[in-house]
Amino acid sequence: MKQDKHGKNHKFGMVVDLDKCTGCGSCMVACMSENNVPFKEDESNKKDSLTWMRVYKITNGKSFPETEICYMPRPCMHCGGKGDHGHSPCVSVCPAVATDYDHSSGIVSQIYTRCFGCRYCMGACPYHARYFNWWDPKWPEGMESYLSPDVSPRMRGVVEKCSFCFHRYQEARDLAYVEERDDIEEQEYQTACTQACPAGAITFGDLNNPDHAVSQLVEPDAHNCGKPKNPKAFRLLERLQTNPKVYYVSEREWVRKAGDNYLDGEWEKVKNNHGKDHG
Amino acid sequence: MKIDRRSFLGLGLGAAAGVAVSPATWKLMDDSSIWTQNWSWTPVPRDGEVTFDNTVCSLCPGNCGLSVRKIDGRPVKIEGRADYPVNTGGVCLHGVSGLQYLYDPSRIKTPLKRTGDTFEAISWDDALELVATKLAEIKDAGKADRIACVTNHGVGTIPGLFGRFVKALGSNNVYAMDTMDKTWEKTLEKMHGVHGTLGFDLENSDFVLSFGTGLIEGWGSPVSNFKANSSRKERGATLVQVEPRLSNTAANADTWIAAKPNTEADLALGMANVIISNNLYNTGYYVSGFGPGFDELTAMLKENYSPEAVAQTTGIKAAVIVDLAKRFVKAGAPVAIAGKGKGATPGSMREFAAVHLLNCLAGNINTKGGAWILSPQDYDQWPAVEMDDAASEAIEKPAMDPAGSVAGFFAKAGADKSVEALLISDANPCFALADAQAVTKAVQDIPFVVSFSSFMDETTQLADVVLPSHTFLERTEDLPSGAGMARRVTGLAKPVIDPVFNTKNPGDAILAIAKAMEGTVGDSFPWESYEECLEAVTGDLWSDLSDQGYAAVQETPPATRPSVDFTFVAQNPAPIAAEGTEADFALILVPLDNVRIAAGSIASSPFAVKTVADTVLLGKDVLVEMNPETAKANKLSQGDLAVIETPRGKATVKVNLFEGIMPGVVAMVKGLGHAMDENRYVNGKGVNINELMGPVMDADSGLDAVWGIRAKISKA
Ligand code: SF4
Ligand code: SF4
Ligand code: SF4
């Protein structure tokens, strides 16, 4: 387990600026292309459509012309669980250790060859970030030619999900090792979705590193379950204490409110409570 | 169904819940997972050396720079090229999907010749010979002026070679697909007396007033617009979107103004009236450039476009109009833009002129953050075309559509059936033009159709000879910017892989045909290959193109200050209404451009289709968007099957309720409903909206002017 020069672990995370996101879907396709995600003739049943990154559309529910919409890209949240001890909802239930929490990077791994398809993790994940391969992947004749050797294609019967492009982390680390550097630079490890986003809505980096843009954007409070100190930032279903490493930023209050479920009147009490409440 | 270990274990979520607590089971499961891990039929991609190749995307007019990651020479991933001046690293989902086009097994793999209802594979030599002979026959019969070509874009050397070839034969019938650029050209001719097109310096503007342009729906050069839009917050810039439905652009804008469909021109004229009557127009350097018609314009606006009158027409409150006009003209670098949706259709000249009037009044012509009048692209310098007597005589006959509209050309071709031969390159008019059925009929009536295409699209299916083209990843091609970009960048696409199938660069195919025809036609094409031609005609630009993969031609506003002629607007041209009567068709159907769906000459890739929401495409059904109020009035609810009918056609659709669309307006996405048998990912999915639309030609521009058509809808 490699640690950086401060002797601290990395905690890779993502910040999505929902006011910049245009819902264009580049991130979804960049992810599919990077990670050898297969596709079927009909993908309109979204429950069995493998989309490691899925862009949801939410609305404020008001009628014309007060209506507003917002797109919300959803990769795997790479939850660290309370205190970042690695008790992610999925990791806690996997009987085969096919999904695990990597303390050196904060990434929730998925080892396809260990997974035997019980799908407990899918039931446990509150973000629907996990997908089951109901069929063997099949590429139209000749299209296998574009598959990348960096990510192994999955087979029927296993669960898959966003890996924060872990292979890119490995590559960056290998390079640093060869060049005898202690650690990798912020720009050396960027995910495919971050790179592709034409709106620059996604920022990726080490939440533990105060020099990285992600920590500056959300100011995660390490003593408070990673809660953002930035009042415009939030995480999805934060109150479940899954401690996700994907943060969202929006100027719009209704968008921030949509990040969790609140009882009537409850939002007013908690909305400015960032950094104080420990759940 | 075969029940193997893995699928058995996978039958029910939690099927093994009870037993999983004992360590024995744990061990067993671990073993079983190891035992089941190797599946011979799951591909194991070959590893190898990693390299990167730069090229330029031509799937849309954006022409983004791409970086293609290759492993052992095999392209595996497309990314945006970080040092490319258009997209600086960003890329849209169609560009990322490029490899799916490259390896698409439904691509045309070899030249084809029609025999009856089927195609027969033939050799390149035979195919080229066949085309050359047939065209020579037509020319020798004195009908060279009845030969036409339709290319996707109008600029660059591949369209240039097509145009030159048809000219050398003796015909003026050279067309590119109609886009907003054509309407801008006509507008500039009328308002400034110049030949050129308009670019918008969005990245430097602090107040963008968009009249239905889908800035983040894929308008113009999509990624460059995404970037400009995204930096708005940091730059303190404002975006106001005028549109009857909450598009992504409207949702992302600072202000959304829901004007009734096709009243954008009225709103712009109302704003102009506020600006002029309050003496807010730019009185600095620019007013001296105000040419004829300003007094007439002032009087006309005063009489017809008071805020109250415009409020009536547009449904927008008078106070909002006044406020918007003031905010616009007082901004530091305001710019008003027109060209609806992706800008892939022309539009009404009244509307474009009214919108451009705002630019003129704000004095932002050829300024930083404003609207730039760009002279026509002319970096490609061609030697004179050689013509024999027959060609010289034929070329005297005018083009079938004097306005240069491809819609007009097909209307004429369909009506008088006088076209003898049609060459089509990279374009799919039978799908992409309004009233697709009529265009299809017109093409069917042409005795000899040659399609230069990579895919068996709707138009290619009707061809007599199919000459398969390289995809953009296999070809060399210069790709000049346009499509509303202010800065000028010309990119060079370079092959990142040897051709996957037996295809050619369409430039080489046309050279070969010309050579086979010999005489002056052959003499007009002195180059051995397309690449040689490209290098020769791009002249000064070539070294930059070949060294960097692009040439930045112009980065700063043009120095000229063309004067403004207000006469056209001052005449108060009449609005062009959507086709159909309100009595028969109570609703208005507007097309909806969705950035995730390719709506032009190419069909969407499997990846792109996969990203489409189930509120847009469900199974094979397209969903039509309507306000719950509209649905109620038509006795429809969410998910209902319904029949939508317009004066041009009817289709079965499903209903999707959306609060963000104006009551009385229904919207349907463009780009679905392909009939491409071999491509299961798009074939028969949804309805082609162009089968429900009809062109309404604008007398002033000769171009299709409407965005939408009257419609009615009822439960199926
Ligand atoms: S981080 Fe990588 S794996 Fe995760 S959504 Fe983005 S591209 Fe996909
Ligand atoms: S690529 Fe960026 S802008 Fe597009 S949907 Fe994804 S996050 Fe949003
Ligand atoms: S925006 Fe256009 S040019 Fe750019 S990547 Fe997408 S399709 Fe290609």
Image: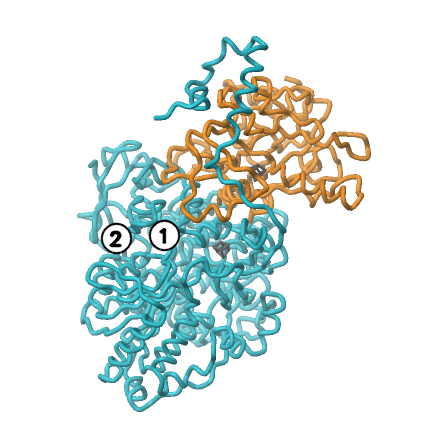
Chain colours: A orange, B cyan
Q: Secondary structure at mark 1?
A: loop
Q: Depth check: A221 or B307 in front? A: A221
B393 to A42, vertically: above or below: below
Residue picked out by circle 2:
B691
Residue B265 quadrant: bottom left
Q: Are marks 1 and 2 on the same chain?
A: yes
Q: Are marks 1 and 2 in contact (CB under 8 Å)?
A: no
The answer to whether the residue bearing label 2 lies less than 8 angstroms from the nearest atom of ligand 3 is no
Q: Going by the image, does B498 lie left or right of B163?
A: right
| Disc 2 element | helix
Image quadrant in which the C terminus of chain A is located: top right
Q: Earlier in the sequence, mark 1 or mark 2?
A: 1
**Residue B531 % position (x, y):** 51, 73
Q: Residue at x 43, y 62 (%)?
A: B470
Q: Position of residue A136 (x, y in %)?
A: 43, 33
Viewer-nearest residue: B592 or A75:
A75
Badge 1 amino acid:
Ser
Q: Position of residue B214 (x, y in %)?
A: 44, 52
How many other residues sit within 10 Å of disc 2, few (<14), some (14-19) or many (≥20)?
Answer: many
